[in-house]
Amino acid sequence: MFLALPAVAADCATDLQENDAWLRNQPEVRASLDANTQRDLRDLRSAALILERNGQDDACEDVVDAMETIANERHEEAQNAADAVDAESRRETLTAAVSVAELQGVLRADELIGRDIRNMENEDLGEVDDVVVATSDAGTSYAIVAYGGFLGIGEEQVAVPLSSLRLTESRDVLVLDISEDAFEAAPRFERDDMSSLNDPTWVESNQAYFDTNI
């Protein structure tokens, strides 16, 4: 039992019992407490009991509050450290992604459709709704990216040149090195209307936008 408490009746002692129960029921918090912190909490607990025995209930309750605060702060610090490691690992994965234009071998459309699009900050930009392949060497192939809606309702669509995308080694995420704000400001593409892809002015403007912002 962690920081076991002898049975006493005062209000502050009840608070201590509740604090003990809280720690027992929070294994992830206990796991984040190093030996020094556990020793400090035991010392604070002993001090709280001394204060309670001497009728210093307010001071006792302050100590109990401080114990919970310290435990939560150590837990938060441990979580932040773990998150930082995870974030660095994710960034390495995104950085190592290979340009779609440079991939070796065959790339099937179903390896792109439904894939998440993320930027280098690991922000979710949307997912690939469709792939449009150019029918001439001079044409541009696109990933049609949907975002901002749910199950096709209220979605915006952007035609991202395939050459602007990179694919992670596991082929489960496409990387577009653009800020979330810049992506949301990209030229719009109307659902079920491919005419803009045959408009040289729109095509040039769309390509220039991604060339400038990536």
Image (cartoon, helix red, strand yellow):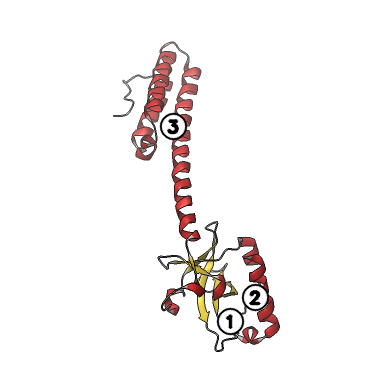
The N terminus, quarter of image: top left
Q: Is residue 155 above or below residue 82?
A: below
- The residue indicated by pointer 2 is 207
Looking at numbered disc 2 in the image, what kind of residue is underneath it? Gln
Q: Position of residue 26 (x, y in %)?
A: 37, 38
The C terminus, quarter of image: bottom right
Task: Please state if 185 lies on the left or on the right of 103 as rendered.
Answer: right
Q: Earlier in the sequence, mark 2 or mark 1?
A: 1
Q: Element at badge 3?
A: helix
Q: Is residue 94 above or below residue 107?
A: above
Viewer-side residue, 200 vs 129: 200
Residue extending furthest left? 1
Q: Earlier in the sequence, mark 1 or mark 3?
A: 3
Numbered label attached to residue 71: 3
- The residue indicated by pointer 1 is 140
Numbered label attached to residue 84: none
Looking at numbered disc 3 in the image, what kind of residue is underneath it? Ala
Q: Position of residue 134 (x, y in %)?
A: 55, 85
At horizontal 65% and vertical 83% (from top left) the residue drawn is 196
Looking at numbered disc 1 in the image, what kind of residue is underneath it? Thr
Q: Element at badge 2?
A: helix
Task: Please state if 28 lies on the left or on the right of 72 as rendered.
Answer: left
- Mark 2 Cα within 10 Å, few/some/many (few <14, many 20+)? some
At horizontal 41% and vertical 23% (from top left) the residue drawn is 40
Viewer-side residue, 165 vs 49: 165
Q: Position of residue 44 (x, y in %)?
A: 42, 20
- Which marked residue is nearer to the observer: mark 1 or mark 3? 1
For the residues bearing labels 2 and 1, Cβ distance under 8 angstroms: yes
Q: CA distance from mark 2 to mark 3?
A: 53 Å
Q: Earlier in the sequence, mark 2 or mark 3?
A: 3
Q: Is residue 75 above or below residue 154?
A: above
Q: CA distance from mark 1 to mark 3?
A: 56 Å
